[in-house]
């Protein structure tokens, strides 16, 4: 619901809101421009000011002071700019044609009342977007206390979150004040203006010199809005003085204040809201509001990209029974969608048996399912045994789940090569049991999307439900493209660690929509993302960390040959000119954050490749320290020349290259201990760690760093939960 509220009006209103924001940003410069050109002289009284004006412009009928401090004298309806220090004329006042044009465009789009309605609707849409955005952000970051934690996700997601956090308060302020001003324009809300009353009569005695009038001496010009001078030769006429506090009348002979009407509360409110919307008189507020407005078009583009990605990545489940009517609910935790295809097979088989089935992401768990008697959870595991993005709120939601009469089964999807095989699914299993739900079958882990293991689980589930359940799963193959090898470099043969660096050309986009998508950055990849390679003899892809980014025009990976390994053997056999079938998967959790704190990169063997990619992209010269491990510098010092060049170019601050098959050989984890003092100092500066390579190396690095961090009362686990430790180990 919250997401719909944020995305649908967001997309519909995006263009109008952006238009209003851009015109608003231009107008927000007005207070600054006025401030720059406004004359000095704020200390004098209104009596002195009028005295000086009249010395130069004896025919003056009224004097107006704008919020920026500019003083204008009106002589027969002609505005003349005045230097308040001397009272001298600065020439006729000309309103900026640019600001007049933009003011009209912003308020009514030159469409009269119709345009004012559109502007008002855009302001309402902005209020909805900003408030639902804040709620979504709190949700996404895991509570309001985490609101300013490091943002995760794709580039669009991170940009969207970072900009929204910076701009949302100002945007909400502009939008709410804009709604109010629209309501005032249409008379739905009063601006508190009291209209003109009749001024009192003055004493009719001989006028005294203006500079001597006590009531005018008491008003500093900083409070003045306007002063209307008495008609010449009418001794009973009075000065009408409007200040920020109200309107008063001053006798031109005695200088006494004859009457004073303070501003009504609604009028004061209107003045305050008008100032908050326009920044009038507060140039810094204008600049702040303008900068926030400029974020809107960027938020619109990144928001559209996020929405498109979500829509295209979640498979369609036709004929869903709906959560209210379903007797069986299937919840899916998936990052790269293969688990959804297993859910589709399960749904079809259950529907064939006459069940009403509802399928949803795990984060979509509702507080209750009125007709359901079972919930089946299919959960993949990622990273360090953690949840896929669409399941990261599940455990929290489970706490509010009323599951009386509902049984459950959890099926884990993972890969035994990972240290925490199906760990997240196991966490879910324990949480559901602890919540008091009754299991239908025991917990089942599925290794590497095995269709056979899935079929066996289906038979056991069916038996427990008292029916026959045949799950014949046909794996859906990821969409691949043909990547042609253009370059290869071999390392490590002499030290029995054959490793090859492969550079592939990026295929041309097959259609104009694909071309558009990659132009918009939807299909682009970054170092640290994964290349899924399909070996010709096996339907299961193997993943390789990418060292390049799509903007480089090549896809670069580094592959370590495994004895008896299907895919690594196949890749080792490639020669320039050969092609592979491959696809790219984003790996948003393994990307450097956008901060400027030091980055400590640790990798060994092929694991160094994505880390070199991060160094290449360090154009801002953030401090980057690389610990790289190999066997022998003469044989498998990967990227040796390039790393030297990156040190010279300042993209890499220090390189710690460690080799194990040389005299006094060491592994990266040992070198970390040698550098403990420097590492602690970097951690105190907010350093972030990124580790890539084999699971064994990952374990060694964690153990060493726990030792290094202990004197700081920190641990790898604590850094990890603070978003300062990311690993890609396999
Ligand atoms: C996220 C991710 C990133 C990866 N990045 C890289 C990378 O940048 N470079 C790279 O070379 N590899 C990387 N891998 C590993 C890669 O995906 C393959 O697992 C590896 O190349 C072996 O595949 P294979 O087909 O040759 O072996 P398989 O035919 O799948 O397996 C053959 C034998 O080797 C064992 N085996 C398979 N993989 C491993 C392993 N990693 N360690 C120990 N034993 C294993 C199997 O259990 C089996 O006994 C990554 C894996 C993941 C999940
Ligand atoms: C980057 C990455 C990290 C992974 N981490 C784990 C892990 O820690 N434990 C595990 O059992 N499987 C892990 N896997 C394997 C996936 O869970 C498995 O491939 C699953 O079938 C993917 O399902 P999905 O396509 O629906 O996301 C990982 C896969 C990738 C690509």
Image: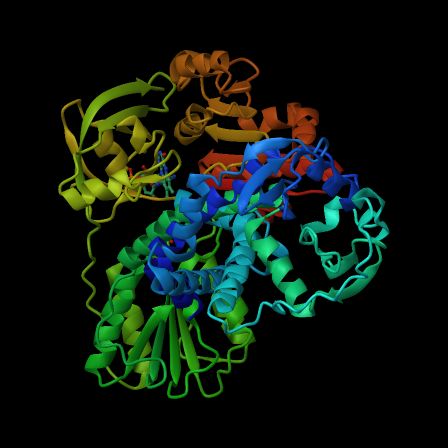
Q: Nearer the viewer, residue 42 or 19?
A: 42
Q: Is residue 191 above or below residue 140?
A: below
Rendering coords of residue 77 (x, y %): 53, 47
Q: Residue at x 81, y 63 (%)?
A: 258
Q: Is residue 358 above or below residue 578?
A: below
Q: Is residue 202 above or below residue 26?
A: below
Camera sees residue 303: yes
Q: Nearer the viewer, residue 152 or 495?
A: 152
Q: Which image quarter: residue 363? A: bottom left
Quarter for ligand 1?
top left
Quarter occupied by the C terminus = top left
Q: Residue at x 18, y 46 (%)?
A: 513
Q: Residue at x 22, y 80 (%)?
A: 351
Q: Which image quarter: residue 44? A: top right
Quarter occupied by the N terminus = bottom left
Give the mark count.
Answer: 0
Camera sees residue 154: no
Q: Is residue 410 above or below residue 297?
A: below
Image position of 528 (left or right of 660): left
Rendering coords of residue 105 (x, y %): 38, 51
Q: Nearer the viewer, residue 474 or 359?
A: 359
Q: Which image quarter: residue 272? A: bottom right
């Amino acid at each position: 619901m919250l997401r719909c509220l944020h995305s649908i009006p967001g997309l519909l209103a995006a263009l109008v809101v952006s238009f209003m924001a851009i015109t608003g940003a231009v107008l927000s410069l007005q207070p600054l421009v006025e401030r720059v050109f406004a004359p000095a002289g704020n200390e004098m009284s209104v009596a002195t000011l009028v005295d000086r004006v009249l010395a130069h412009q004896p025919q003056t009928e009224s004097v107006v002071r704008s919020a920026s401090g500019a003083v204008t004298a009106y002589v027969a309806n002609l505005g003349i700019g005045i230097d308040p220090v001397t009272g001298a004329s600065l020439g006729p006042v000309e309103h900026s044609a640019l600001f007049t044009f933009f003011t009209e465009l912003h308020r009514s789009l030159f469409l009269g009342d119709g345009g004012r309605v559109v502007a008002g609707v855009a302001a309402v849409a902005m209020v909805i977007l900003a408030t639902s955005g804040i709620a979504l952000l709190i949700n996404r970051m895991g509570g309001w206390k985490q609101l300013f934690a490091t943002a995760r996700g794709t580039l669009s997601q991170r940009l969207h979150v970072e900009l929204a956090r910076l701009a949302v308060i100002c945007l909400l302020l502009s939008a709410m004040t804009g709604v109010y001003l629209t309501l005032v324009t249409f008379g739905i809300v009063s601006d508190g203006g009291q209209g003109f009353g009749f001024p009192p009569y003055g004493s009719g005695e001989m006028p005294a010199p203006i500079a001597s009038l006590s009531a005018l001496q008491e008003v500093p010009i900083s409070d003045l809005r306007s002063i209307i001078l008495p008609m010449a030769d009418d001794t009973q006429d009075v000065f009408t003085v409007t200040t920020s506090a109200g309107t008063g009348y001053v006798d031109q002979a005695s200088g006494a204040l004859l009457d004073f009407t303070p501003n009504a509360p609604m009028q004061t409110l209107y003045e305050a809201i008008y100032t908050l919307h326009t920044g009038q008189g507060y140039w810094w507020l204008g600049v702040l509001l303008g900068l926030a407005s400029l974020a809107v078009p960027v938020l619109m583009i990144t928001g559209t990209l996020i929405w498109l990605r979500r829509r295209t990545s979640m498979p369609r489940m036709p004929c869903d029974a709906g959560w209210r009517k379903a007797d069986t609910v299937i919840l899916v935790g998936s990052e790269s969608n293969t688990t959804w295809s297993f859910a589709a097979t399960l749904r079809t088989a259950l529907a064939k048996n006459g069940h009403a089935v509802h399928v949803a992401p795990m984060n979509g768990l509702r507080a209750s399912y009125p007709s359901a008697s079972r919930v089946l959870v299919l959960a993949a595991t990622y990273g360090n045994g953690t949840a896929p993005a669409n399941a990261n709120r599940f455990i929290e939601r489970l706490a509010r789940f009323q599951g009386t009469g509902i049984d459950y089964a959890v099926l884990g999807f993972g890969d035994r090569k990972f240290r925490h095989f199906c760990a997240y699914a196991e966490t879910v299993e324990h949480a559901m049991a602890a919540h008091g739900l009754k299991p239908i079958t025991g917990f089942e882990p599925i290794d590497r999307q095995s269709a056979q293991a899935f079929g066996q689980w289906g038979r056991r589930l069916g038996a427990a439900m008292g029916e026959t359940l045949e799950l014949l799963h046909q794996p859906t193959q990821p969409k691949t493209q043909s990547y042609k090898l253009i370059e290869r470099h071999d390392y490590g043969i002499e030290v029995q660690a054959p490793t090859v660096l492969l550079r592939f050309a990026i295929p041309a986009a097959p259609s104009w929509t694909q071309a558009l998508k990659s132009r918009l950055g939807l299909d682009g990849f970054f170092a640290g993302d994964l290349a899924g390679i399909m070996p010709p003899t096996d339907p299961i892809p193997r993943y390789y960390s990418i060292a390049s980014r799509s903007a480089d025009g090549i896809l670069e990976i580094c592959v370590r040959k495994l004895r008896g390994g299907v895919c690594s053997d196949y890749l080792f056999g490639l020669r320039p000119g050969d092609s592979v079938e491959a696809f790219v998967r984003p790996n948003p959790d393994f990307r450097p954050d956008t901060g400027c704190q030091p980055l400590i990169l640790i990798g060994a063997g092929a694991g160094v490749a994505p880390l070199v990619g991060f160094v290449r992209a360090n154009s801002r010269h953030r401090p980057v320290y690389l610990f790289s491990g190999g066997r022998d510098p003469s044989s498998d010092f990967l990227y040796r020349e390039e790393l030297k060049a990156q040190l010279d170019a300042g993209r890499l601050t220090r390189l710690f290259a460690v080799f194990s098959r040389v005299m006094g050989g060491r592994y990266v984890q040992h070198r970390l201990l040698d550098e403990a003092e420097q590492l602690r100092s970097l951690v105190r500066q907010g350093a972030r760690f990124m580790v890539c390579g084999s699971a064994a190396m990952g374990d060694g690095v964690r153990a060493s760093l726990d030792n290094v961090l202990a004197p700081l009362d920190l641990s790898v686990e604590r850094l990890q939960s603070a978003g300062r430790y990311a690993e890609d180990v396999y």
